[in-house]
Amino acid sequence: MIGIFDSGVGGMTVARAIEQLCPQYPLLYFGDIARTPYGSKSPETIIGYSRNNTDFLLEQGAELIVIACNSASSTASDALRSHYQAPILDVITPATTRAAEVTANGRIGVIGTRATIKSGIYPQKIQEARSGTRVFSAACPLLVPLVEEGWGSRRETKMILRRYLHPLRLKQIDTLVLGCTHYPLLKHMIGPRIGKRVKLIDSSVEMAVHVRNFLDQNEQLRQQLLKTTGAENRFFVSDSTDAVQITAAKIFGRPIKLEKINV
Ligand code: DGL
């Protein structure tokens, strides 16, 4: 099975994209709701939590790990890769590759949590993928709580987005990477505020394409995963509230059964 983890419920945007593109591979999802947010925590803490989450998914039978969380991907993916044998895919690589491909003027914006932006991983990877690009980053710490409060379409959210995105508009970017699990849920608000000409890179969609391509190139693992085809996708959380249930149902377009575990 494919094991996916996130700091909370937002990573379900990645799980949903993988489910839609690769329905033949059953999923195990773990959302660390009890310890969210990761985006404001130290690298040591994020690495420790990411190891707990990976251990849990491997115990449940995961054979491939997808780090859906940008904050964990930017901080913990090297530590996880050096510690586990199972392949570990991070959500950042596919988005940076795509951004480098689609930009016409070589000016790319990135928005994410403080941990993600502070890690500097997005500019580094985008420049590795295409040298000479200019990357302009903005930490947007208020967006995750707004999504989780269900304020995704409110006037206040529009104002905050305008404030965050204005400096990137001035830089005349033509591509904007949504570098956080929650931001696909704000696409309808981000698009008009950053400007119609700016291409939005949704890391959940890019991750799903990356998982499919990765498995197409790893036949043995692909066959291994296909043995579980037909098994039900399972969604584990370390805490559950009404707001989490609502966000999960919104992401999948159907009610999601959440299984609570202790961390
Ligand atoms: N999942 C996190 C990310 O993609 C957002 C929420 C958090 O800060 O934990 O960065």
Image (cartoon, rainbow, N blue to C red):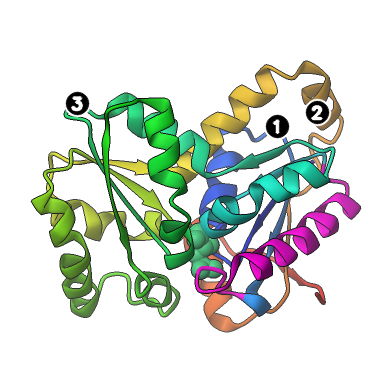
Q: Is residue 252 above or below residue 36?
A: above
- Graded by Cα atoms within 10 Å as few (under 14), some (14 to 19) or many (20 or more), the crowding at tag 2 reads some
Q: Horizontal and vertical percent for residue 150? A: 39, 76
- Graded by Cα atoms within 10 Å as few (under 14), some (14 to 19) or many (20 or more), the crowding at tag 3 reads few
Q: Horizontal and vertical percent for residue 82? A: 77, 42
State left or right for residue 114 relative to residue 15: left
Image disc number at residue 24 = 1
Q: Secondary structure at mark 3?
A: loop
Q: Residue at x 72, y 66 (%)?
A: 49
Magenta-colored stretch includes residue 44: yes
Q: Is residue 33 above or below residue 113?
A: below
State the image quarter where residue 131 is shown: top left
**Would you say the beta carbon of the disc 2 residue lies within 8 angstroms of ligand 1?**
no
Q: Secondary structure at mark 1?
A: loop
Q: Residue at x 72, y 35 (%)?
A: 25
Tell whether label 2 touches label 1 (CB within 8 Å): yes
Q: Is residue 263 visible?
A: yes
The residue closer to the viewer here, 259 or 119, is 119
Q: Residue at x 43, y 40 (%)?
A: 124
State left or right for residue 63 relative to residue 123: right
Give the amino acid at mark 1. Answer: Gln
Give the amino acid at mark 2. Answer: Leu
Magenta-colored stretch includes residue 196: no
Q: Which residues are magenta?
A: 36-62
The residues bearing labels 3 and 2 have C-alpha atoms spaced at a distance of 39 Å
**Would you say the beta carbon of the disc 1 residue lies within 8 angstroms of ligand 1?**
no
The residue closer to the viewer here, 236 or 252, is 236
The residue closer to the viewer here, 125 or 254, is 125
| Residue for badge 2 | 226
State left or right for residue 166 relative to residue 160: left
Give the amino acid at mark 3. Answer: Ala
The residue closer to the viewer here, 112 or 256, is 112
